[in-house]
Amino acid sequence: RWTGPVELVLEQVARQTGVGLSEIRGRARRSAIVEARRVALAAWTFELGRPQREMSDVLGISSSAASQLRGVASPATIARARSVADACVRGLPMACAPRRVA
């Protein structure tokens, strides 16, 4: 289980998807924004081993909406989530590097 902050994951998602942080946290349903949220949830839960609720609270969505988003993650979404998680664990391109813990 990785112990870094949710903000680091969201910043990586924003960098890799081109969707702004405020849009990721907002209410818009444009496909690119929904996909960015899906990547954030997949990175947080599948790749970093953190509780879904922590990310859904930050995104301002219900647990059931988060489960639904995560449940339709494509192989491309999972690959992007893995890339986000790897960048977070390595601390790139961030200055401080949170550590992945077993």
Image (cartoon, rainbow, N blue to C red):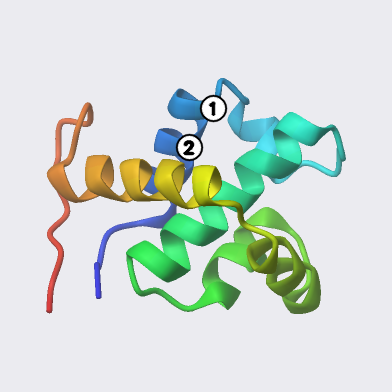
Which residue sits furthest front?
75
Up-down: is 64 above or below 10? below
Determine the CA span between mark 1 and mark 2.
6 Å
- Residue 67 point in image, percent of width and height: 70, 73
The C terminus is located in which quarter? bottom left
- Residue 14 point in image, percent of width and height: 51, 30
The amino acid on which the numbered mark 2 sits, given as a three-letter code, is: Val
- Residue 57 point in image, percent of width and height: 65, 67
The amino acid on which the numbered mark 1 sits, given as a three-letter code, is: Thr
- Name the foreground residue: 11 vs 70: 70
Q: Residue at x 86, y 37 (%)?
A: 28
Q: Residue at x 76, y 69 (%)?
A: 68
- Residue 16 is left or right of residue 21, and the answer is left
Up-down: is 95 above or below 1? above
> Mark 2 packing: few (<14 Cα in 10 Å), some, or many (20+)?
many
The N terminus is located in which quarter? bottom left
- Residue 60 is left or right of residue 17, and the answer is right
Q: Read off the residue under disc 1.
A: 17
- Residue 29 is left or right of residue 32, and the answer is right
> Mark 1 packing: few (<14 Cα in 10 Å), some, or many (20+)?
some
- Name the foreground residue: 4 vs 1: 1
**Element class at badge 1:** helix
Q: Are marks 1 and 2 in contact (CB under 8 Å)?
A: yes
Up-down: is 64 above or below 59? below
- Residue 17 point in image, percent of width and height: 54, 27
Q: Answer with the quarter of the image where residue 35 lies.
A: top right
Q: Residue at x 25, y 67 (%)?
A: 3
Q: Read off the residue under disc 2.
A: 13
